[in-house]
Image (tube, grey):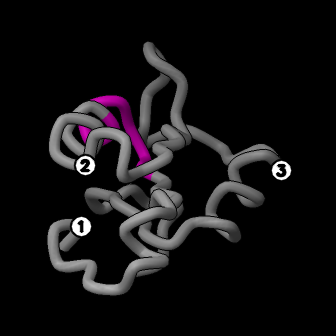
Amino acid sequence: MLGCLETAEAASSPLNVAVTFSVLGDLVNQVAGRNANVTVLTPIGAEVHEWELPPSNFAALESADVVGYQLEQWMPG
């Protein structure tokens, strides 16, 4: 998806991407590189299925252009 950006603005402006855990964050960083600002919502070592979002996570989700998740129970289906 990140490789499909066609406008000059999109090419010069990184996407804000919020992901739920570090593996997804690493994947996005490897694929998008400097074309994305990645925010990982769950701290390393935390159990993603038991994580309760603090206000900063809600702010990251609100400002994200793209959200990546893998069926965490606190994400809408």
The N terminus, quarter of image: bottom left
Q: Tag 3's secondary structure?
A: helix
Residue at numbered disc 3: 55
Task: Determine which residue is flagged by label 1.
Answer: 2
Q: In the rendered structure, which amino acid carries the disc numbered 3?
A: Pro
Q: What kind of element bears circle 1?
A: helix
The crowd level at tag 3 (other Cα within 10 Å; few <14, some 14-19, many 20+) is few
Q: CA distance from mark 1 to mark 3?
A: 27 Å
Mark with earlier residue (1, 2)? 1
Q: Is residue 38 magenta?
A: no
Q: Nearer the viewer, mark 2 or mark 3?
A: 2
Range of magenta residues? 19-25
Q: Is residue 69 above or below residue 41?
A: below
Q: Residue furthest front?
A: 8
Q: Is residue 24 magenta?
A: yes
Q: Disc 2 and disc 3: Cα gap in Å?
A: 26 Å
Q: Residues within 10 Å of mark 1 (few under 14, many from 20)?
A: some
Quarter of the image containing the C terminus?
A: bottom left
Whichever of callouts 1 and 3 sits on the residue coming sooner in the sequence is 1
Q: Amino acid at mark 1?
A: Leu
Q: Which residue is mark 2?
A: 32
Of 71 and 57, nearer the camera is 57
